[in-house]
Amino acid sequence: MDNYTLRPLTISDYDVVYALWQKTEGMGLGDSDTREAIAAFLERNCGLSIVACSSDDQIVGAVLCGHDGRRGYLHHLAVALAHRKQGIGRALVNEGVAKLAAHKIQKVNLFLFAQNSEGRTFWQHQGWTAREDIVLVQKALCRPLIKAQRSTA
């Protein structure tokens, strides 16, 4: 990770980060990923989300990081294909976890599509374990604004 720096993700990064998410296989994007929704998330979790920048200040990785006061959550970890296997993903995760720990959050959760085997392998190598005793149950509170997409590219 020698040629990369980490900094807080801001709403001005949205277009570049959203494009990165769209190119990331196994990423699910939907209504909660609009500019307005991400701005609200960043405001509520000020300074916790992170981008990784190359030596020429291009964003090559990102992770949304936040908490509800009890549990921490990581969302949408992505590293550009050409910059993988250099420790960027691990650095983003470690920085996010450290920020959550500074807020006295003791456990961190994330959501991973069941068929995302590459993602599962990454998280297992980072020391994370899948909980087989929990089922995600969800209810939409409003009509979707944009159609959810699952990128495989």
Image (tube, rainbow, N blue to C red):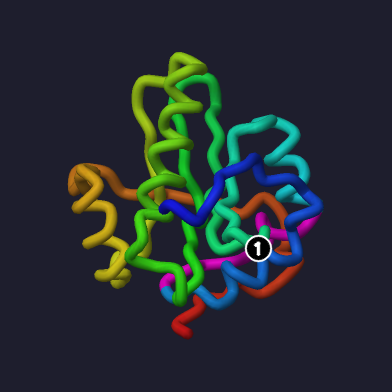
Q: Magenta residues, as a range? A: 26-35
Return the residue found at the far bottom: 153
Residue 41 point in image, percent of width and height: 69, 40
Place residue 148 in its image quadrant: bottom right
Q: Position of residue 132 (x, y in %)?
A: 18, 48
Q: On screen, 99 above or below 63?
A: above
78 relative position to 89: left or right = right
Q: Is residue 28 magenta?
A: yes
- In x, y percent, where is residue 84? 39, 67
* Left or right of residue 49, residue 128 in this image: left
Along the viewing direction, whichever of 5 and 96 lies nearer the viewer = 5
Q: Is residue 121 left or right of residue 136?
A: left
Relative to 55, say whether 50 is above or below.
above
Q: Amino acid at mark 1?
A: Asp
Magenta residue check for 113: no
Q: Tell me what residue is drawn at x 27 percent, y 44 percent.
A: 134
Q: Is residue 68 left or right of residue 108?
A: right
Residue at the spot 60% in from the left edge and 56% down from the top edge? 53
65 or 140, which is in the foreground? Answer: 65
When asked about the image quadrant of residue 58, the answer is bottom right
Q: Identify the residue at image location x=46%, y=31%.
A: 72
Say which of 100 and 139 sits in front: 100
Q: Residues within 10 Å of mark 1 (few under 14, many from 20)?
A: few
Q: Which residue is mark 1?
A: 56
For image coordinates 59% across by 50% down, the residue present is 51
In the figure, 14 relative to 151: above or below? above
Q: Nearer the viewer, residue 118 or 51?
A: 51
**Can you give x and y, in whole percent of width and height, for residue 55 in the image?**
59, 59
Residue 120 quadrant: bottom left
Q: Is residue 71 above or below residue 136?
A: above
